[in-house]
Image: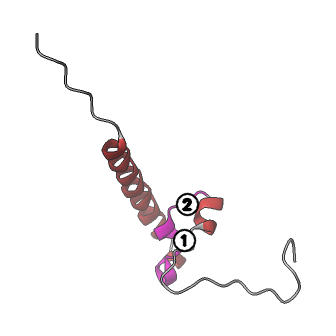
Amino acid sequence: MGDRPAGWVPFWPLGSLQMEFSQTHNIPWKASIGGKDSLYPEFLDKIQQFRAEEAAQKAEEAKKAAPTPAARPKR
C-alpha cells in the first residue's frame, strides 16, 4: 500500500486537473488522458505534438512574466 492507510481511495474533486502522473513520468498532461486513442502506435506522434505545444505555451508564459526593460531617461 505504500504510504497510504489500508482502504484509502484516491479522490479528486470534479473539474480538478490530476497532473501528478504526467509530472512523475515526464509526459505531457494531454498525453496522460489520451483515452482510446492512446492504444495505437500513431499516438506517439500526438505525444510529440503535445510536447511541442506545451513547450510553446511555457515559453509564451515566461515571455509574459519577464520584466520589461525600464525606459531610459532622455538626455
In the image, the segment drawn in magenta is 26-37
Residue lying at the far bottom in this picture: please name it. Answer: 7
Q: Along the horizontal axis of the image, is 53 left or right of 13?
A: left
Q: Tell me where residue 19 sits by quadrant.
A: bottom right
Whole-percent x and y of residue 22?
58, 65
Q: Is 33 in the magenta?
A: yes
Q: Is residue 50 above or below residue 59?
A: below
Tell me which residue sits at (84%, 90%) in the image. Answer: 7
* In front of the other: 42 or 57: 57
Whole-percent x and y of residue 38?
51, 76
* In front of the other: 29 or 11: 11
Q: Earlier in the sequence, mark 2 or mark 1?
A: 2
Q: What kind of residue is marked 2? A: Ile
The dot on residue 32 is 1
Whole-percent x and y of residue 42?
45, 69
Whole-percent x and y of residue 52?
39, 53
Q: In this figure, which residue is indicated by the disc labeled 2?
A: 27
